[in-house]
Amino acid sequence: MTTYWVQVQSAAQQQTRLAEDLAKSGIEQTSHALALQTETMLRKLDYVAAHLVEQWQANAGQDFKAAASKAKKSLPDGAILNVAVADAQGQLLFSDLDAKRPWAGPQALMADRDYFLAHFKTPQPPASMFISRPTFGRISKAWAIVMSRPIDHHGQRQGVMVISVSATYLSRALGEVYTDPQDAALIVRSDGHYIARSHQIDKVLGKSVPLSRDFLTHPEWDHGQYQLVAPIDGVERYYAWHRLRDYPLVVSVGISKAKALAPVALAQQGAFRRNVIGSVLLVVMMLVVSQMRWKAARQAKQLRIAHERLHVTLHSAHDGVWSWHAKDKKVAWDEGIYKMLGVQAPAATASRLDWKDLAHPQDLPKLTREWETYLQGPHDGAFATEVRMLTGDGQPLWVSVRARVVERNASGQPLLLVGTYTDVTDRHLADESLLVERKRLDVLLERFPGGVLMEDTTHRVVLLNRVAIEWMGLSDQDGALIGLPHTQLLERLGPQKAAWLSGTHPQERRESGTTLEVEGPADRVLEIKRIEISDHDESLGCVWLLYDITERKHKERNLTALASTDSLTGLLNRRAFMASLTHALASVQHRSGPACAVMMLDIDFFKQVNDTHGHPAGDAVLQELTSRVRAALRQGDTAGRLGGEEFALVLENISPDDALNKANAIRERIASQPFLTVAGEIHVTVSIGVAFATSEMSAADVLSNADRALYQAKQDGRNRVVSWQQVA
């Protein structure tokens, strides 16, 4: 008996360790997924900050409020509290909280803020986005996490761009995923300061986690686990953490130890009670056997029945014993079953309770069908099923029903069956708890801003969210993709999309962490990242993450266009024009004669236009002049604005006479009609210098010749065309 109870205790300890391992494995995966989602959000904020810096520098701070408002609208309402700009002395230059500038004055100094000190007062200031400790805003009057980027010009740091993200918004986003306060999700800086927490955020803002945390004592680690009682709410949890790759933050997820082990604890309590009953019955039966040895053959039959009952009891860890008699086809329950179901046992003189009356209505057809099938078939095995029974107060109780034939007639038909009822509600609750965790994971996958494809160690699909199915052009009727081998998945994708997963066989895949940019459906541009899942040296499978970077690519193309064009006229800027001229000169090697004609064009007395009519009228003149020049050029000719009122043109494959005629045509088109502006009609003339390039000339040389010809045109009285040959 002692050995038996030692084995029972050992089994209980193994169950507890298994439940702990399952809980830790689950939060490890959840923590990793949350870290990836957090890093995606920070990349978007980083991109918004970089774009705002470019907008501020391009417009010299003018009309910046519209850009700040657009940046705030790119995230959910309330996520960004404020967009601000400070100069190198910490003086606030812009804040979108109030257009009347109530923040001007000493209170507007940011020089004492850690994000300002990080960019101006440290030996190695960050070159990209800096994430501050939680700060109580002097302007917003709310707790915020400040994301800041430096404003540099020609290598000199001129100020800092500040985006204040609501700490409450970050915490609320975590709380929407982890609704149970017994669980916790938190984001902290690499120095331990809290950034967000799913619950009780007001207790942690402005504070740090203890310095003994693994992610603080071991900055070289990128993930880990720990277990402790949280000082904030006194809940003991299992935690798993992941360090973000590109930002100095750590994401940690904790699940309540009590909740994780509750199903196992309840099951062990029930098992202990059943083992106690079994042990007591064993002792009782031993006494009964000792007492009945002297009895006659009449008692031998009862002794065999008792032995069979004991056998079934020991193998089923029963909560109650029942029997079925062929004579009256009735089921008899012992007191344990009545107590289990919370039903009053009938008096000795009353009729026995029909066991079918207490079966759950939805399970009664199943129970009746399986029972009748067992009675009509061979009876060498045991009857076993699991159904719901109704307790005395009408609540469902999951019960494992088992029985075995212990007495037969001469023809082998059963006369007596003895069995047990075992309460397995705790196990079903544990299964339901696992189902809830699976649903949480499904919700997380569906809210993940991209596609997710996961394969196990046998290279079979185990996870595939809706976005991945859509982007990869697959069809998942009735979940047919789950369990699909990798090779068959590639066949369904086709050769082009199969290359997205890098290789036609699992052994040919890219290394973990590598990315690939591809053209997806509906003109999307996708970024595909493959991540190997492993536990130390043991591979657990791999996951592909698909991100839609179409908007980012579109903005990159727009930025490239902005970098090569003049914002006022839409013509090539000086750098882009010089590159175009160099390319034109290179083509002269393939033909004889002039490579091209280069014209320098300057508006006569343009300063007087600005001084007399104002800069808006001057800008209108520049734009209208651009339109008239474009109308006069041939297809393939190039025009650029070199600066101020100075323009340049490149005309390829044109003779000197035709080039001079074209220059005079442009001059006359500009001088013939007045320019309509907000200040009224303005008459404008231009002077043009023309030079012709040959193969041995550089772009700077030919442009210098055209500039000298332009200078001569101005010296000769303006509103005229002069060629370099006339000056040389």
Image: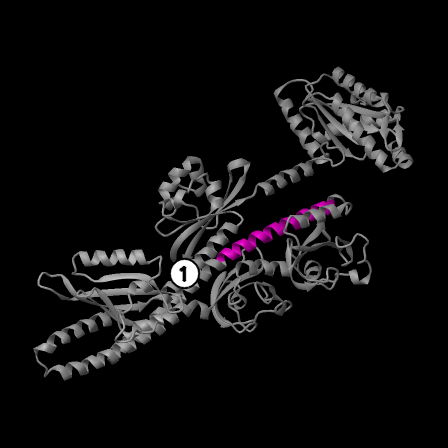
Q: Residue furthest front?
A: 349
**Closer to the camera in the image, 585 or 385:** 385
Whole-percent x, y for residue 666 in the image: 79, 21
For the rendered model, the colour scheme is one colour
At label 1, the amino acid type is Glu
**Closer to the camera in the image, 75 or 572:** 75
Start-end of magenta stretch = 32-57
- Report the side of 631 relative to 481 (left or right): right
Q: Is residue 53 magenta?
A: yes
Q: Residues within 10 Å of mark 1 (few under 14, many from 20)?
A: few
Whole-percent x, y for residue 335 in the image: 29, 75
- Report the side of 534 relative to 632 (left or right): left
Q: Identify the residue under disc 1.
A: 432
Whole-percent x, y for residue 75 in the image: 63, 50
Q: Is residue 672 visible?
A: yes
Q: Is residue 237 magenta?
A: no
**Closer to the camera in the image, 669 or 176:** 176
